[in-house]
Image (spheres, coloured by chain):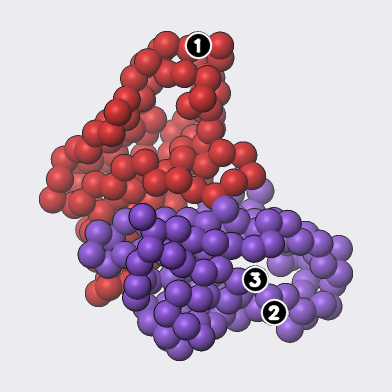
Amino acid sequence: SQTIHQWPATLVQPVGSPLSLECTVEGTSNPNLYWYRQAAGRGLQLLFYSIGIGQISSEVPQNLSASRPQDRQFILSSKKLLLSDSGFYLCAGLQRATTEAFFGQGTRLTVV
Amino acid sequence: KQEVTQIPAALSVPEGENLVLNCSFTDSAIYNLQWFRQDHGKGLTSLLLIQSSQREQTSGRLNASLDKSSGRSTLYIAASQPGDSATYLCAVSPPTSGTYKYIFGTGTRLKVLA
């Protein structure tokens, strides 16, 4: 079965520092990949999605960017973090054959 | 713009009770609907996926139904257990040419009391 590995589980970063969150996928090839952010008490907000290597679409203009250098690798980055970037970041994948989404365990980011 | 609403926001029930969680969406043009469970501080675990042509799916003590025309889905949990305590999220995928961008509700936080 498909699995998403996401790390680190928690991260505390100072304002203005760079960010790199990575997720990798096992058990499937050529998945759609997604980055979501979940703010406390709120729903999941889709940030980026990718349907293939090097193909990134942004859903919300912001301080973040995403890249997909390999089929099963998805990276979320920032050059300079803001306090408002704090949140719970979730990487998700989707097999087009089943259209079922599967998620990683998330990264809790606190910007101080 | 598609909006997904889940009612109630929180629910507390005694162990053994059967319960229903509700999900409604504003645009009936969906590709599919998926129910997830999220334990506190963790990622999402897929529970059930219902394609738009289906009316229900079952897995163990869980049964999810879909009424696309009325924009509603329900998740039925039979004989609830304390281990069922979690937040339950529903998400719909619009029919957009292979992107499958799921839109999520804000969830129902369930607590099952022993």
In the rendered structure, the colour chosen for chain A is purple
Q: CA distance from mark 1 to mark 3?
A: 40 Å
Q: CA distance from mark 2 to mark 1?
A: 45 Å
In the displayed structure image, the side of residue B65 where residue A5 appears, left or right: right
- The residue singled out by tag 1 in the image is B14
Establish whether labels 2 and 3 are both on one chain: yes
- The residue positioned 42% from the left and 80% from the top of the image is A71
Residue A65's quadrant in the figure? bottom right
Q: Position of residue A39 (x, y in %)?
A: 64, 54
Give the amino acid at mark 1. Answer: Pro
- Near mark 3 (Cα within 10 A), the count class, few <14, some 14-19 or many ≥20, is many
Q: Position of residue A29 (x, y in %)?
A: 35, 72
A67 lies above or below B85: below
Residue B80 in which image quadrant: top left
Give the residue pinned by disc 3: A21
Chain that bears disc 3: A
Which residue in the rendered view is the most extreme toward the left?
B53
In this view, B42 is above or below A78: above
Q: Quadrant of the C terminus of chain A?
A: bottom right
Q: Are marks 2 and 1 on the same chain?
A: no
Q: Mark 2 is on which residue type?
A: Ser
Residue B39 makes an appearance in the image: yes
Q: Residue furthest bottom?
A: A54
For chain B, what colour was chosen?
A: red
The residue that label 2 is drawn on is A78
Disc 1 on helix, strand or loop? strand
